[in-house]
Amino acid sequence: MLEINRIQQKIVNVAYQKLIGDRRCKFNDFSKVSPENRTVNSPIMQFYSSVDNIGNYLPVLGIQKMLSQSSDTWCIHDKNIDFDFINTNYKCVIIGGAGLLHECFEEFWNKFLNECRLPTIIWGVGLCLPDSSGVRTDLVDSTKRSGVSQKVVMEVAKRCDLVNVRDNLTANYYNFKDVDISVCPTVVYVEKFKKSLYKESSQVLFSSHKELVAVSTQKRLKASLKKLVPKFAYTDNIQKPSSGIDDIISRYYCPTSILVTTRLHGAIIAYGLNVPYIAIPRDEKLRDFHRLYSNGISIENIVDLENALKQGLTNNIPMKPIAINPVLTFGEKASEWVASCCNNR
């Protein structure tokens, strides 16, 4: 049955692409271009993750908005990043944003340390530390994980002109001293959607994280929400040919009165739109986000979610002003840095 559903989805995706085109956000990504077809369109090379989870794209879009230009990109999942090409054709490099310090990117950070020769900044990145199964019983993966090697990341950071991370969790883990900490650049990009918010909406949106939460738990959450709220919607935050980033935000987040989320970027989008959220963390990055920025409540299990909704605890969540100024201030520093790099090389 699962295989049949996958085939059906592929057929739908192909049909959409033929009829109306692919609506997914796409960058000038050299991991998808053969060497003979490479065309340099920017003095900046930016490393990002091209997995279609919109949390990988929104920080890049926020960064591009603050720089007032589109950088060329290279997916850090690529095992064949050509640093000779990058060192020859670009003025500077940005690593960021999103969870690029997850341990799966260890090879990239080592290769970058050994082969990149360009001025570099780290911008809007964060650590990913999923809960161990000893603490949570509904996790998909019971393996204890950690971030990219502290030694390697700290060596890269020493070479950087500017370092910005999205939370204290990351700054403390890597013992960063002169580090800038501010909310994810996503909040800059989603500002444009504020005018499209539905003020009188009663919709409750569930924003899930399939990699962190077991299918059985997601089903229980959906079932509970459908029983307890007058209007329910669901998104997995994954871009598809028929539904790109802007579509997901417009269709799901803008008509939402409160967000229920197991993933960090669901909370970040809600925060940027000034929509209250209920976080159900399955990793430390979401807990740290809530500690730093609030504008929601954090609970640890489905029973607490049901109690919060039944007791109306979401009706009086104190909402602080969005902490966007530190993000914009770092954006100004980064813009000046890019200009300096381009003038000096």
Image: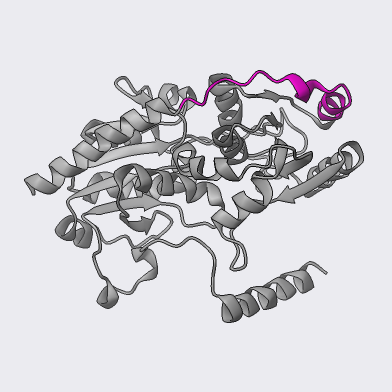
**Residue 316, percent across and down?**
74, 19
Residue at 14 percent of width and 48 percent of height: 342
Residue 319 sits inside the magenta stretch: yes
Q: Quadrant of the N terminus?
A: bottom right
Q: Nearer the viewer, residue 298 or 132?
A: 298
Left or right of 339, for residue 215: right
Q: Is residue 238 visible?
A: no
In the rendered image, which quarter is residue 242 located in? bottom right
Which percent across, then down, holds residue 184? 46, 35
- Tell me the magenta residue range: 303-323
Q: Quadrant of residue 277?
A: top right
Q: Does 222 appear above or below 326?
A: below
Question: In percent of the image, x 72 and y 36: which residue is there?
Answer: 257
Question: Residue 156 at x, y = what percent?
Answer: 28, 37
- Image quadrant of residue 134? top right
Residue at image point 56% right, 36% down:
268
Rendered location of residue 198, percent (x, y): 68, 42
Q: Residue furthest left?
A: 344
The image's colour scheme reads one colour
